[in-house]
Image (cartoon, rainbow, N blue to C red):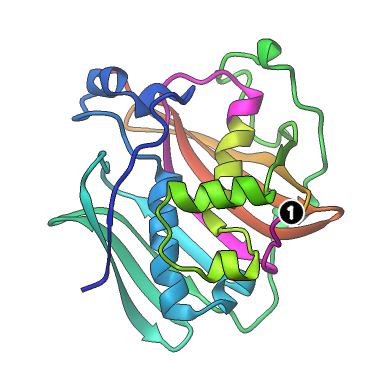
Amino acid sequence: MGYRVTARNAATASENRIHADDVARRYGFRGGLVPGVTVYAYACHALLEALGPDWVGRGAVRIRFLSPCYEGEQLTVSVSRRTFSLVDFEVNSGERVCAAGSASLPDDGPDDGEASTIPAAETPAAEDRPLASEESLVAGEVLGSIPLRADPAVAAAYLAKVTEPSTWYSEHAVVHPGLLLEGANGILMANVLLPAWLHVASEVRHRRAVSVGEQLEVRARIAEVFERKGHHFLGLDVAWMSGTAPVATGHHTAIWQLAAT
């Protein structure tokens, strides 16, 4: 049967206007898109059920967003097990695959590559952000760091926003992985002014569970920029920091400029 959930678009007022009906329709969508980070949060529930709390503490995940999810759609997250510690998953709206990926409990320690070396940097004031362009989004550039609130009020509000049915997060005062991934969107938006844009894929490796109330910082470096079928993409290496140590690292891919319609 899988995990069933009603998709909710809580981002209609976001600076990313792809979540607003009128703008999304100009790009050929039926309406405002449910954020990819929200779809990821729905998948996380099924992964917690399949792999247990260890996945939140030391697990890895890859997810690709394949087709839009819309407000009010009934989604099903299905998990198929390859091994005891490795699963594949899909998020479906009826026959349409909205997202797919894999998750695991790796036996080895995290190999974070470039993400573990990202330094802190100053973020521009909101009014000073440059427009997203090939000049302002350059491979190798370190983005300005941002704080990520994870206090009890924020953590509880997040669980309600994504209609998380498990009580495990609140009972153990652990931050939901989806809240962390929202920080990858946040750091991009804090550094450049973007047109309507799309989150298309993410990879995350958890080092440990994050406790509610920890002071978190998101750091990122632009790993690559490229064009495909008229869409302009960028990939970010991301590190979620608590003090001087990463609690998670990952890679976040977005279309920062959609092809002209």
Binning the other alpha carbons within 10 Å of mark 1 as few (below 14), some (14 to 19) or many (20 upward) gives some
Residue at image location 31% in from the left, 35% down from the top: 33
Q: Position of residue 202 (x, y in %)?
A: 49, 52
Q: Position of residue 77 (x, y in %)?
A: 29, 64
Q: Which residues are magenta?
A: 189-213
Q: Residue furthest bottom?
A: 84
Task: Name the kind of residue labelled 1 in the image.
Answer: Gly
Q: Which picture quadrant has residue 235?
A: top right
> From the viewer's perspective, is 16 left or right of 26?
right
Q: Residue furthest left?
A: 95
Residue at image location 43% in from the left, 59% down from the top: 164
Is 202 contained in the magenta span?
yes
Residue bearing the label numbered 1: 213
Is 55 contained in the magenta span?
no
Q: Nearer the viewer, residue 164 or 140?
A: 164
Looking at the figure, which quarter contains the N terminus?
bottom left
Q: Check the image and report above or below for 71 versus 97.
A: above
Q: Check the image and report above or below for 231 versus 219.
A: above
Q: Nearer the viewer, residue 192 or 155?
A: 155
> From the viewer's perspective, is 147 left or right of 56?
right
Q: Position of residue 180 (x, y in %)?
A: 60, 51
* Dot 1: element: loop
> From the viewer's perspective, is 188 left or right of 195?
right
